[in-house]
């Protein structure tokens, strides 16, 4: 586990990176008991890596072990011409405005029940850009469903009566609804999210993106 303090404009967020079930359990409990988040809004995002798709390997992640080797999504080339690659969710980010929990799903030995149950609580609104696609990938790769996933683009289009916002990304949504200075260097965006130790720039990017979703969602849902 690693913890890093991340600043975004006037906000200071505690970013926790972990692949340990006990740490996930602890911070899910923090989300549930956070009195500052009375509206129960959670920013949700994922980052992907690429893995070898070998049909001879057994899909045994759900039995407690991920046997597939994670490789860099954009820079590492396969050594065998007939080797196939596929995307896999590497990390899940959740933010309640105070903490950003960055769960290294691909490195977990087993899925925490606390996380499975938390994502199914209907009282919480899980918000993000393209969140339906994120949730579909979580379901596909780890069997993680989400009860109340809210797409910020569609929500913004409805609340602000600006239909074009439905197809907009984080930058335009943030500029229109909750202006903040987001740093998105391509070297970080397209970096290897499946590695064991994320660097400080990756942690900052993951934490601030998820916080931005929280901030925009909070404003749209509750004004």
Image (spheres, grey):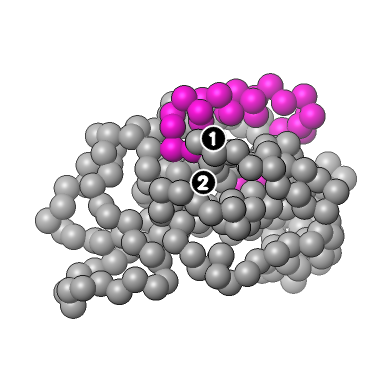
Which residue is most to the left? 56
Judged from the image, the secondary structure of the residue bearing numbered disc 1 is loop
Query: Which mark, by number, is residue 119?
Result: 1
Q: Which mark is residue 133?
A: none
Horizontal side of 3 relative to 152 (left or right) equals left
Residue at the (68%, 22%) spot, across then down: 33
Q: Quadrant of residue 125?
A: top right
How far from the left and from the top, in percent, is residue 99? 67, 37
Residue at left 49%, top 65%?
A: 191
Which residue is denoted by mark 2 in the rendering?
A: 92
Judged from the image, the secondary structure of the residue bearing numbered disc 2 is strand
Of 125 and 203, which appears nearest the observer? Answer: 203
Answer whether residue 31 is visible to the viewer in this image: yes
Q: Residue at x 70, y 64 (%)?
A: 183
Q: Residues within 10 Å of mark 1 (few under 14, many from 20)?
A: some
Q: CA distance from mark 1 to mark 2?
A: 12 Å
Name above or below for residue 110 compared with residue 143: above
Which callout, 1 or 2, points at the residue further toward the start of the chain?
Answer: 2
Give the magenta-colored segment's residue range. 18-44
**Position of 55 relative to 106 (above/below):** below
Assess disc 2: are there few (<14), some (14-19) or many (≥20) residues with their C-alpha within 10 Å of its C-alpha. many
Quarter of the view holding residue 11: top right
Query: Can see residue 138?
Result: no
The magenta stretch spans residue 130 = no
Front residue of 157/29: it is: 29
Residue 49 locus on image (x, y percent): 41, 59
The nearer-to-camera label among 1 and 2 is 2
From the viewer's perspective, tell me whether residue 44 is left or right of residue 52: right
Q: Locate residue 48 relative to residue 96 in the image: left or right.
A: left
Q: Residue at x 26, y 61 (%)?
A: 52
Measuring from the top left, give residue 178's x and y in whole percent. 83, 56
């Amino acid at each position: 586990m690693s913890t890093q303090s991340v600043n975004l404009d006037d906000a200071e967020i505690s970013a926790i990176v972990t692949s340990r079930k006990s740490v996930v359990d602890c911070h899910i409990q923090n989300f549930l008991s956070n009195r500052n988040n009375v509206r129960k809004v959670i920013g949700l995002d994922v980052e992907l890596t690429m893995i070898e798709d070998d049909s001879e390997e057994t899909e045994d992640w759900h039995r407690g072990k991920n046997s597939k080797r994670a490789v860099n999504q954009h820079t590492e080339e396969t050594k065998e011409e007939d080797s196939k690659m596929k995307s896999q969710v590497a990390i899940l980010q959740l933010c309640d405005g105070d903490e950003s929990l960055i769960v290294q799903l691909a490195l977990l030995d087993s899925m925490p029940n606390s996380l499975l149950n938390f994502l199914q609580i209907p009282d919480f609104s899980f918000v993000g850009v393209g969140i339906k696609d994120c949730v579909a990938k979580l379901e596909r790769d780890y069997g993680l469903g989400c009860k109340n996933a809210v797409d910020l683009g569609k929500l913004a289009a409805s609340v602000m009566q600006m239909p074009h916002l439905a197809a907009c990304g984080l930058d335009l949504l943030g500029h229109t609804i909750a202006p903040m200075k987001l740093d998105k260097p391509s070297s970080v965006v397209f970096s290897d999210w499946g590695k064991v130790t994320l660097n400080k720039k990756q942690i900052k990017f993951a934490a601030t993106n998820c916080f931005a979703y929280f901030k925009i969602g909070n404003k749209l849902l509750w004004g």
